[in-house]
Image (cartoon, helix red, strand yellow):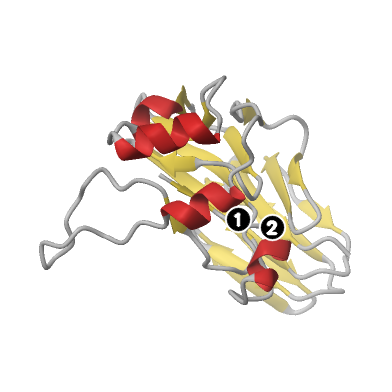
Amino acid sequence: IQVHPDDIYAREKQLGNFGKMEAWYVLRSDDGRVASGLKAGIDKQALVAAVESGKVEDAVEFLPVSEGDIVYLRPGSVHALCRGVMVYEVQQSSSITFRLYDYKRPDADGNLRELHIDQSLDVINFGDPAIVPAPVSGTTAVESEHFILEQFTIEATHQHEARDSFCCLTVIAGSAEVGSDDVSAHLELAETVVVPANRAFKVNPLEPTTYLISSVPT
């Protein structure tokens, strides 16, 4: 169970230039769930007590997720991906993670992994409601200041206009040919292609196909 800082905290503590905002698109869920936020009424004092008593799981909100759900995790949101759930993740270019709780799991050498309690308490957004997973509406799944995540489901060729950002296109159902000028790539399930900025491209499905596009706001 973890939390990420924002850009301001990362820079103040000289941890890097960026904090970490992320989003999950649920690809598969075997009656799974995610941790997303703290339960109502859990303030800093209550969370400290839960940490000290080894009951962090009792303070965290666990929510069921289904295929096609989106979980948008702002910096400061307590979260965890649980058993039986597979996601596509898009995030800021940062690896800063503060572990609040790790289920007392040993590593390969039998040691417990390091926790970052003080840093977690510094950055958690206490009082924010839990982030309820939501299905995609239209083609835009998430639009933030750091990234945009879009979903497309097509049965015929779809033309994408050139944009100022590069695009990462990933097939999550079906298969397709992705082409731009005289360059093309064949994509099967879970394969990704990067389209450079300022280049129009088209997606020709070989069967009913769903794909995700991640890009950067410009």
Determine which of the numbered discs, if any, sits on residue 205 in the image.
Answer: none
* Mark 1 neighbour class, 10 Å CA radius: few under 14, some 14 to 19, many 20 or more: many
Indicate which disc, 2 or 1, sits on the residue closer to the N terminus.
Answer: 1
Name the residue located 88 percent from the left edge and 60 percent from the top edge.
Answer: 161
* In the rendered image, the vertical position of residue 214 relative to residue 87, given as above or below: below
Name the residue located 27 percent from the left edge and 60 percent from the top edge.
Answer: 113
Determine which of the numbered discs, if any, sits on residue 214 in the image.
Answer: 2
Q: Residue furthest left?
A: 110
Q: Is residue 144 left or right of residue 206?
A: right
Q: Is residue 213 left or right of residue 163?
A: left
Res 10 → quadrant: bottom right
* In the rendered image, the vertical position of residue 181 relative to residue 201, given as above or below: below
Kind of residue indicated by mark 1: Val
- In front: label 2 or label 1: 1
For disc 1, the marked residue is 90
Kind of residue indicated by mark 2: Ser
In percent of width and height, residue 3 lies at 52, 50
* In the rendered image, the vertical position of residue 93 relative to residue 38, given as above or below: below
In percent of width and height, residue 38 lies at 52, 30
In percent of width and height, residue 101 lies at 35, 45
Q: Nearer the viewer, residue 69 or 197?
A: 69
Q: Is residue 44 left or right of residue 116?
A: right
Q: Secondary structure at mark 2?
A: strand
In percent of width and height, residue 27 lies at 48, 40
Quadrant, the C terminus: bottom right
C-beta proximity under 8 Å, tags 2 and 1: yes
Res 179 → quadrant: bottom right
* Mark 2 neighbour class, 10 Å CA radius: few under 14, some 14 to 19, many 20 or more: many
Q: Nearer the viewer, residue 43 or 88?
A: 43
| Residue 83 shows up from this direction | no
Name the residue located 49 percent from the left edge and 27 percent from the top edge.
Answer: 66
- Separation of residues labelled 2 and 1 (CA atoms): 7 Å
